[in-house]
Amino acid sequence: MSRENSRFLDNVRFGGSLGLSFSDNAFSAFLAPKAVYDFNNLASAGIGIAGTYTNADNYSAHSISGSLIGLLRPIQNIQLSAEFEENYVSRSWELEGANRKDSYWYPALFLGAGYTTGPVTVGIRYDVLYDDEKSIYGSALMPFISVYF
């Protein structure tokens, strides 16, 4: 490996997020591995993939997504984040007499804030593009835990 590649990889952190959301008899969970490049102690940018599962009374959905991530650490232990996701959604309803299935693309833009200690950040994020008809998340607000090494 060249010296330049080694320096680049020294600034890359791998990790990701786990999330849970509960709302009106609905449950959402997501798993999102990510990689970020630290430009300095204040700013990072990266990419990620994610899988999401949602289940409610007679409804279920899953999605696969790719994302672009920006992280800002304005003061020690505080992290601000912005993450744009493009989701492929597949969902289904089990209705009396008729079942329905739907698949489509859906964008999400999460703005978040968290408390960081070591490699762990705990916080909350909000989807500013949230649409309760299309989003598979139970709510626009979602707590998260991110870990990067």
Image (spheres, helix red, strand yellow):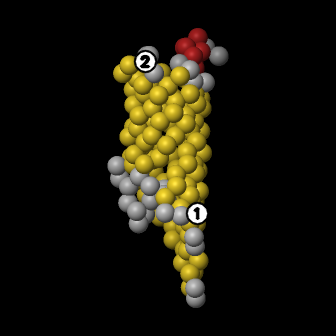
Looking at this view, name the residue that lies furthest to the right. Answer: 1
In the picture of the structure, the residue carrying the numbered disc 1 is 55
Query: Which mark, residue 139?
Result: none
Query: Which mark, residue 76?
Result: 2
Residue 22 showing in the rendered view? yes
Residue 70 showing in the rendered view? no
Name the quadrant of the C terminus. top right
Distance Cα–Cα, label 2 vs label 1: 37 Å
Residue at x 58%, y 85% (from the top left corner): 96
Looking at this view, name the residue that lies furthest to the top. Answer: 3
Residue at x 43%, y 18% (from the top left corner): 76
Give the quarter of the image for residue 134: bottom left
Name the quadrant of the N terminus. top right
Looking at this view, name the residue that lies furthest to the front. Answer: 24
Give the quarter of the image for residue 98: bottom right
Counting from the top left corner in percent of width and height, residue 84 is at 41, 44
Counting from the top left corner in percent of width and height, residue 15 is at 60, 32
First of labels 2, 1 by sequence position: 1
Mark count: 2
- The amino acid pointed to by label 1 is Asn
Check disc 2: other Cα within 10 Å, few if <14, some if 14-19, many if 20+: few
Give the quarter of the image for residue 81: top left
